[in-house]
Image: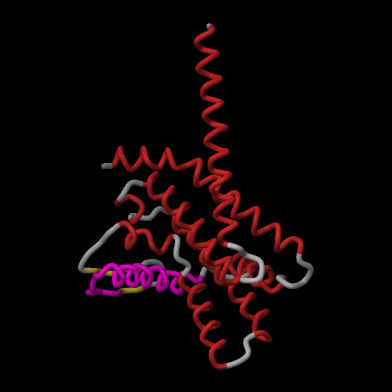
Amino acid sequence: MKFIRNFAAVLSIPIVAASAYTLIRTFLDFTGKSTDYYIPFWVGILCYVIFQIAFYKPMRTYVFGHELTHAFAGILSGAKVKKFKVGSESGHVVLTKDNIWITLAPYFFPIYTFAIIVIYLFLGWITDIKPLYPYFLFFAGLSIAFHAALTVYIIGIGQPDLKVYGVFFSYVLIIAVNVVVFSLLMALVFPDEADLKNLFMAMYGNSIDFYVFLHEGIMQIITAFEKT
């Protein structure tokens, strides 16, 4: 199974790379063209980065969200939570079942960002939330930076979660699912700009172009070897 997973991961790399490139380019296109509309979002990102560099890494907060995501993914998968423990640097959750989504969920699901979105949408049912949009953007940017920075950090120091299904396969899957999750986040945070249908169609087209490029390159190499 490990060989099959790694082989599938290798084959999917062009799709993942093309999709990630398309997502980043699309996001930078509309945020870069706007004047001051999305400044609160970038300010939120910058504030967290400065906070982590100048002060400290809020690891206990991250660990709580990390383990809560394991538990949340487990509950959605039909598991029961038997133990939940959070420390200053690490945590532990015991579930009655496990699968790949439960194991890797914290690495692609920014639970605090989704919590902020849920709160914002809930407020929309009871009040006019248009004046709150800049604050929403600020906290969305802050929480995304928090999730991204600390997820990269804990992966860098080594995580046993990634060894369960193979480190290479886990990396590829985490990046792939992050592309999908952040596409959805972009649609939720920037509803006036993000068009998921066009985005996914662009990802599909760029992925096909990538495979065509690789195929043509391989065929040229084979042809060159045959002539020698």
Residue that appears at 63% across and 68% down: 45
Residue that appears at 38% across and 46% down: 169
Residue farthest to the left, as pictured: 96
Q: Is residue 87 above or below residue 223?
A: below
Q: In this view, does 37 lie above or below 174?
A: below
Residue 224: percent from the left, percent from the top? 55, 13
Residue that appears at 37% across and 55% down: 159
Residue 218 visible in the snapshot: yes
Q: In this view, does 150 lie above or below 165?
A: below
Specify the segment rendered in magenta.
Answer: 58-84
Residue 149 visible in the snapshot: no
- Which quadrant of the structure image shows residue 11? top left
Residue 6: percent from the left, percent from the top? 36, 40
Look at the image and say whether residue 211 sits in the magenta stretch. Answer: no
Residue 37: percent from the left, percent from the top? 74, 73
Residue that appears at 54% across and 40% down: 208
| Colour scheme of the picture | secondary structure
- Locate the N terminus and report the quarter of the image it occupies: top left
In the image, 156 versus 172, the foreground residue is 172
- Which quadrant of the structure image shows residue 111? bottom left
